[in-house]
Image: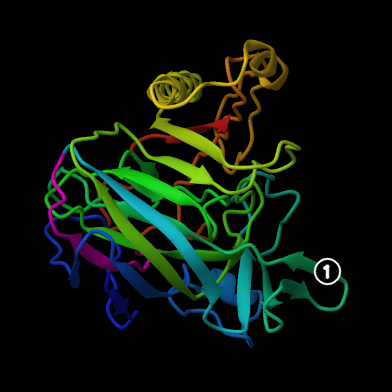
Amino acid sequence: MAEHRLDASEVHREWNNAIAPRLTIDPGDTVVFDTRDAADGYYSRASTHADVIARGPFRGHPLTGPVRIRGARPGDTLVVEVLDVQPALDWGWTAIRPGRGLLPEADFAKPHLNIWDLSDGTHARMGTSVAVPIEAFPGVMGVALDEPGAHSTMPPRRSGGNMDIRQLAAGSTLSLPVLVDGALFSTGDAHAAQGDGEVCITAVEMSARVVLRFGLQSGRSLAEPRLRTVNPPGGHGRQGPWIATTAHGPDLYASAQQAIRYLIEQIGWRSRSRRLPDPEHRERSGEVQRAELIDQPLTLDPVDRGVPETVEPLHHAPPCGGEDGGALSPSSNNLCPYWVTGFYAWLST
C-alpha cells in the first residue's frame, strides 16, 4: 500500500464536487496531509486582541484536498483511519469575539486572543499557570456532496465536514457515505485540544500534519457519518472501543431521535456477526447525555432516558458566522439556511 503527501500550498474553502482532485489514490493507501489553521495563517505569535476584530470576512475553512479514491462509487462507504495528528508549528490560538459563542456579550464585552505554547508537544500552555493536554484531531473531514455548486464548510453535514468531534483523534476510524464518484475527500481545521463543544467558537486552533489511511466498503451504504474510537466519550468510566452514530438537521430533538435510530440499526448489523452484551449489562449502561452547545438562538429540552446500549448524544450547532465568530463573506453560498444540529449516539463495544 502506497503512502502519499499532500501539502497545503493549495486549498479550497467550500464543498463543491466540481473542484478537481489534487491526488488520486487506491483503497488501502495512506496520505500525509499538511493543513492550514482555521484562520488561514492570519494570526501569529505576535498577534493581539485587536487582531480579532481587524480580521476580515470568513471565507470558509482552508481545506487540503480533494483526494479521489479509485473505485469509490455512490452507495459505498469510505473508511478513514486516523493514524496521527501533530502540530505543524509550536503554537496555536483561541479567539473570542463579543456576542459569539455560548456566553452572552456581557460576559466577554471585548475581543480576546490567546496564543498557546505547543512547543513541548504534550500540552497547550497558557503562560505558566494553565496546561491543557494535547489531544489533536482534524475538526473537518468530509467528502463532496452530490448537490451542484458551492456549499459552506461551516455546518456538519451528511457528508461529514465540520463535525468537530474531539474523539476523532489518532486511533479512531471515521466512516463516511460516498456521494459522488471518487468520494473527493478533504480535511483541515485541526485542533490541538477541544472540550465537548467549541463554546467560544474556537478550540486550540493549529496548523497540522494529519496522517490518514483510506479504505472502501463497496455496496455498504450509510445515510450519515459513523465513527469508532479507542477511548470512551469524555467523563465515561467504561474503557475500550466505542462506536458513534451521527445525525444532522434543523431540529435538535429530531436529530437525537435519528441518531438513536442509526444506533439501533448499528446494533442490529453488529448482532449478525457477534453476540451483544447480556440484557443486564445493557440495562446498567443505558444512558443519554447532551453536550456541545456553542451558539444561540436554540431551544433545548432535557434529554435523560435509558436506551438499549450505552449512548451519549452530543449536540452540535454551528454558528452563523466565521470560525472565530467573524462575518461571513457576502459571496459565500448556502451559509446558514437554518441552525444545523447534530447528535452523536455512542455505543460501548
Front residue of 60 and 342: 342
Q: Is residue 153 visible?
A: no
As drawn, the residue found furthest toward the right would be 129
As drawn, the residue found furthest toward the bottom would be 46
Quadrant for the C terminus in the image: top right
The residue that label 1 is drawn on is 130
Quadrant for the N terminus in the image: bottom left
Is residue 62 rendered to the left or right of residue 172? left
Per the rendered image, the range of residues in magenta is: 58-74
Q: Can residue 208 be seen in this view?
A: yes
The kind of residue on which mark 1 rests is Val
Residue ID at (36%, 44%): 175
Q: Position of residue 40 (x, y in %)?
A: 43, 75
Front residue of 247 and 309: 309
Residue ID at (30%, 58%): 330
Residue 68 located within the stretch drawn in magenta: yes
Q: Where is residue 180 in the image (x, y as percent from the top left)?
A: 14, 47
**Relative to residue 288, is residue 208 depicted above or below?**
below
Figure coloring: rainbow
Residue ID at (71%, 57%): 109
In this figure, what is the number of numbered marks? 1
**Relative to residue 19, is residue 71 depicted above or below?**
above
Residue 338 located within the stretch drawn in magenta: no
Name the secondary structure under disc 1.
strand
Is residue 182 rendered to the left or right of residue 4? left
Q: Quadrant of residue 340?
A: top left
Q: Quadrant of residue 178?
A: top left
Is residue 231 rendered to the left or right of residue 224? right
Q: Position of residue 118 (x, y in %)?
A: 67, 78
